[in-house]
Image (cartoon, grey):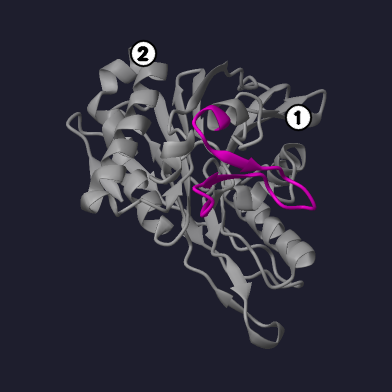
Amino acid sequence: ASKPRDNGRHSIAYAPAEITSPRGSCEPASAKGPLDASLGNATRHGVSPGPSGSSYAKINQDRGVAYWPFNSSHNEALFCVFDGHGCNGEKVSEFCMKAIPAALQEHGDELRSHPEEVLTKAVCSVDKAVLKKNGGQFARSCGTTSTIVYINGSTLWAACSGDSRAVLGSSKGGKIRARDLTNDHKPDGEGELERILNAGGEVSRGEYGRPARVWAAGKIGLAMSRSVGDGECKKYGVIPNPEVQRFELAAASDAKPEGDGDRFVIVASDGVWEFIESQEACEIVASEPGSMSRGCAKLVQEAALRWKREEGNYRDDITA
């Protein structure tokens, strides 16, 4: 959608485009757009087991959006991924996809001067709005992750609540290197476990391929320690507050674009990260240097193939 700004510029908001199932003889589908070379956006819905070994499509609860220009500036950009969970979790991620960017732009000047404070305030205020919606029933037992990457010039701020990860891909000595910009918030993580236990929550340890979960009154098992929504779990130490980190970017020079320097950022739901490590994800994206759109689609397609190989007729939603 092209949205006019007061200064006459146009900010383009990109939502991930659903791509089709890959076939052995076909090139990966790419998410088309006017910034094909520098912006990729793709998603695939999950599947659940059906009768006789079949599978059926799930509602895609992932949401993602990219804004550039952002905050009335060509020097700023915003990238967000929200991975909904629980019955009606897609409604919570949809709400956040619209409300959080709007909240950040509403306080645009403060965002530039105090980004950590404004990013935290925006996520927490949207969490309060979600929990109050429909008399508290809207997100009582469902919610979403929230991962936000805000770039202003050469400074990047990553604000993460949950396990949707952001990764920086850089080139050094002719090789691609990955650097995590966020930490996955798991219930048994350092600092997270103590907070949950102190609030009276219970945590089942991750084992035998199953994730650790925080339990609300023994009924709701949430596989993350921070989220937006999840009203019942908020009583037991789950918080919306994002972990905010700052990074300075150093891109390769215009004279030698393939030289050493930061190349790209990936923001993706855990459907990507379940079977693909950050380093491999960066190598997949970097294998399509002429088009971030193709690189993004290739990453999502590869993640889908890993789910097929490892889990058969079950697949989580995948968005990057």
Residue 138 shows up from this direction: yes
The image shows residue 55, relative to residue 239, as above or below, that is below
* Magenta stretch encompasses residue 159: no
* Magenta stretch encompasses residue 219: yes
Which badge, 1 or 2, comes first in the chain's sequence?
2
Residue 182 shows up from this direction: no
Rendered location of residue 4, percent (x, y): 21, 40
- Work out whether residue 209 or residue 80 is closer to the camera in this orientation and state it: 209
The image shows residue 199, relative to residue 48, as above or below, that is above
Specify start and end residues of the magenta stretch as a single range. 197-220
The image shows residue 154, relative to residue 204, as above or below, that is above
Q: Which residue lies furthest to the bottom in this view?
A: 52
Which numbered dot is residue 114? 2
Q: Residue at x 60, y 72 (%)?
A: 48
State the image quarter where residue 125 is shown. Answer: top left
Rendered location of residue 169, percent (x, y): 67, 32
The image shows residue 96, relative to residue 160, as above or below, that is below
Q: Which residue is drawn at 29% across and 47% down?
A: 2
Is 44 left or right of 123, judged from the image as shown?
right
> In the rendered structure, which amino acid carries the disc numbered 2?
His
Q: Residue at x 73, y 46 (%)?
A: 284
SS under mark 2:
loop
Binning the other alpha carbons within 10 Å of mark 2 as few (below 14), some (14 to 19) or many (20 upward) gives few
Which numbered dot is residue 177? 1
Q: Residue at x 66, y 31 (%)?
A: 189
